[in-house]
Image: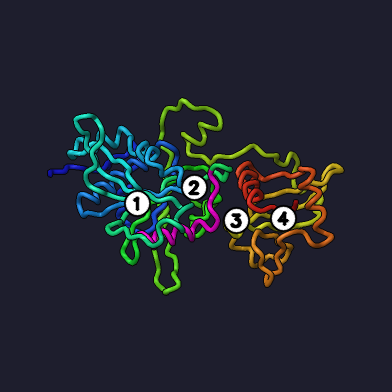
Amino acid sequence: MTVKLKNYTGNKFYNGMELRKIAAPWNCILSERASGKSLWWLKEMIIDYFTDGKMFAYVRRYDEDIKPKNVDRYFEDVNFTEWLQKGSEYEGIMCYQDALYLFISGDNGKPIRKEKIGYVFALNIAEKRYKSLHYDGVYNILFEEFITSGTAAGKYLENEFNVMNHLISSICRRNQFRVIMLGNTIGRDCPYLKEMGIDLFKTKPGQIYQNELLQESGNKIKCCFDYVAPAEKTSLFFGKAEKTIVKGEWDVESVPHLWFRLQDAELIYTCYYVSEELKNAYKLRVIWYDDQKYLYVYPYDYAEMPYVRDDIFTDTPMFKLKRFIHPEKKRHARLRELFKSGHILYSDNLCGTEFRRAMKRYNPFI
């Protein structure tokens, strides 16, 4: 069979050629929605299969997303199916019993499975379903929507980064692999990027960031983060939706801000909150202004926390560091009062959104 498949190399839509050249085992791509990143990397994995026989894994967070009807819908992108049909004899990709197949249509219009090219996986069932099975030939691992908003319908799993690592170990064993993680600008409080040493508070769109992580064996593994710059386009959206979907800005809530100068308020008490799970830190100041107490919250550099001498609250018990998992001292009572009254102000909407998400995970002040 003659296969003539080429990937996109232009500038109008997402182009992953520069990231591919780096050849890192771990790759995160973050962009606005509808940038073309999913299509580009799916094409790349199909080309890898036809060129070198490399199969791929399609990974989602929840098993609901890997039901055959939902997987088939993902691969029904007309831009992908037209590209595949022009360059091969196949008409698309279908899911059958946790495996992915190229297919052609039979005389009755129903798909006929042909070559197996990969498998589907869900993180929330990884421990009980995949651990003892074999997936020979898998090289590429495509993880869609690795960033979530933290809502009830899309929370990160407990210790999700470790779950993902164990899943990759089950899939690839000791063989080489390439992970492609695709996400939209929903929330910066992402455990994957934190674990990889990528600080979304400091990164800027339009760059590829590289980092080497030291493994317990002493070896180093390369991680890349492609923060795709928003494309110029005409939008049919407006307001908050336009900023998130079209402009690639972070999805945030409107939260109360200071309406006075901080230096005009009296400082009563300072403490910190650390989310060890998300690797986020916040500085909390109890202030007095115009006969009223407020709690003022703004981001703090997580890496600087070991040097702080004030009270630190955390979602993880760390007794050696004398960090509090809930208020214990008389001076802490004012924090409970302010959380109960809702007198909380934030430096900006993004800080408020992320702090509130951290509080939903673990709030020591209630």
Label pair 3/1, CB-CB below 8 angstroms: no
Q: Are marks 4 and 3 in contact (CB under 8 Å)?
A: no
Q: Name the residue under label 1.
A: 57
Of the residues shown, which amino acid type is indicated by label 3? Asn
Q: Tell me if residue 72 can be seen.
A: yes
- The picture quadrant where one finds residue 230 is top left
Helix, strand or loop at mark 4? loop
Amino acid identity at mark 4:
Pro
Going from N to C along the chain, the mark reached first, 2 or 4, is 2
For marks 4 and 3, give the one nearer the viewer. 4
Q: Distance between the residues labelled 3 and 1?
A: 31 Å
Residue tagged 3: 280
| 4 or 3: tag closer to the N-terminus | 3
The circle on residue 147 is 2
Judged left or right of residue 99, residue 161 is: right
**Tags 2 and 4 in contact by the CB under 8 Å rule?**
no
Q: Specify the amino acid type for callout 1.
A: Ala
Is 242 situated left or right of 179 in this image? right
Gap in Å between the C-alphas at discs 2 and 3?
A: 15 Å
83 is higher (above) or lower (below) than 175 = above
Residues 311 and 1: in front is 1
Point 34% across, 57% down: residue:
178
Check disc 1 and report its element: helix, strand or loop. Answer: strand
Q: How many marks?
A: 4
- Residue carrying label 4: 364
Circle 1: is it few (<14), some (14-19), or many (20+) Cα within 10 Å? many
For marks 3 and 1, the one nearer the N-term is 1
